[in-house]
Amino acid sequence: MRLEIVTPENYDAAFDVKVRPDQEDLVAPVVKSLAEAYVHREHAWPRLIYDGDRVVGFLMAFLDVAWDPARDPEDRRSGLWRLNIAADAQGRGYGRFAVEAVCQEVRARGGPRVYVSYEPRAGGPEKFYLKLGFRPTGEQIAGQTVAVRDL
């Protein structure tokens, strides 16, 4: 498994990453994430997840973002913004690999913790993130639970 930067040569493969139909309300499609990465390029870290020559997923991290400048301008955070694992590739460790890769990148940049937010509903990713060491902070953003993992 490895991560690759999204390039003119592989972006079509990125668009082919589709989660299961029952997960489509949990994560934005890759095309929206890439548009957001373009708009927020100073903080977005989009990557394709490969297994050999096959694209099996997409992740996007946010790096060193002022979380709520109105409340605390010093509260800067990094974390996992999006995680899309192809429907036929789920359950094979790609999601865990992606989360660990984001943790490694944040740690390399001097970050002490990694954040994620997720939809708090049955069938959502909460158990996955809890198993990887995230804990809810008590915060919510756009109706999603915010969780953190210390590095």
Image (tube, rainbow, N blue to C red):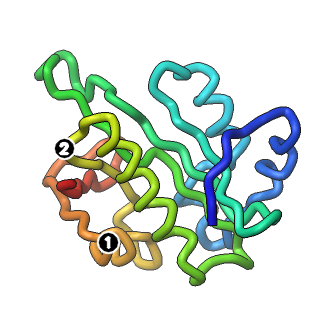
**Could you tell me which residue is drawn at 82 percent across and 63 percent down?**
53
Tell whether 60 sits left or right of 111.
right
**Could you tell me which residue is drawn at 71 percent across and 68 percent down?**
51
Above/below status of 144 relative to 89: above
* Residue under numbered circle 1: 132
Q: Amino acid at mark 1?
A: Leu
Q: Residues within 10 Å of mark 2 (few under 14, many from 20)?
A: some
Classify residue 79 by image quadrant.
top left
Q: Position of residue 41 (x, y in %)?
A: 55, 22
Tell whether 83 sits left or right of 115.
right
| Disc on res. 112 | 2
Q: Position of residue 95 (x, y in %)?
A: 52, 68
Q: Position of residue 72 (x, y in %)?
A: 11, 21
Q: Amino acid at mark 2?
A: Pro
Q: Quadrant of the C terminus?
A: bottom left
Q: Secondary structure at mark 1?
A: loop
**Could you tell me which residue is drawn at 52 percent across and 22 percent down?**
40
Classify residue 118 by image quadrant.
bottom left
Q: Position of residue 15 (x, y in %)?
A: 80, 49
Q: Secondary structure at mark 2?
A: loop
Q: Earlier in the sequence, mark 2 or mark 1?
A: 2
